Image: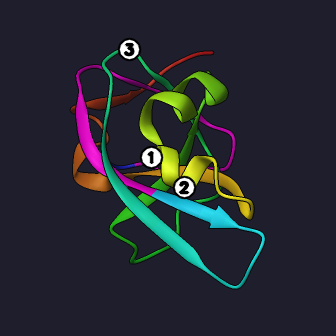
Amino acid sequence: MKETIRDGEVFVAREAVETTGLTHWRAPFTGGFECTIPAGTVLIASHDQVEGAPGVGFRPSAYEEMERLLVPDADRTAEKYDSYTLVVLLTEIGTKVIRGQR
């Protein structure tokens, strides 16, 4: 991956990608879960790439649909659950996940 990823840039999963999802809460807590991003999923960078970080956070364009599919029920239905982000490693950018369009 050569170009720095910027907030709002669009990517597409060319194939299924095993990754980690992060859960965000309305509390001083974060959590996580293992998941597989399905091939064809459109991903939107949720922030600028941080220098030295091994990955970048993304939100699927079909956010609610992917939330029901990927986020564990126990987290998603918890009272203080707020949102989630999918982390894609930089080693996957340009191979399994490519720049794309909405």
Position above or below: 32 against 63: below
Q: Quadrant of the C terminus?
A: top right
Question: As shown in the figure, which amino acid type bears the numbered disc 2?
Answer: Asp
For marks 1 and 2, give the CA distance.
6 Å
Name the residue that disc number 1 marks: 72
Q: Residue at x 29, y 49 (%)?
A: 19
Q: Nearer the viewer, mark 2 or mark 3?
A: 2
Q: Nearer the viewer, residue 27 or 58?
A: 27
**Residue 64 placed where, x, y %?**
65, 28
The residue wearing badge 2 is 75
What span is in magenta? 3-21
Dot 2 or dot 3: first in sequence order is: 3
Q: Is residue 83 visible?
A: yes
Question: Quick one: 52 or 71, which is closer to the camera?
Answer: 71
Q: Position of residue 21 (x, y in %)?
A: 43, 53
**Which mark, by number, is residue 40?**
3
- Distance from disc 2 to disc 3, alpha carbons, whole Å, reads 25 Å
Residue 51 is inside the magenta segment: no
Look at 74% across and 59% down and name the residue there.
79
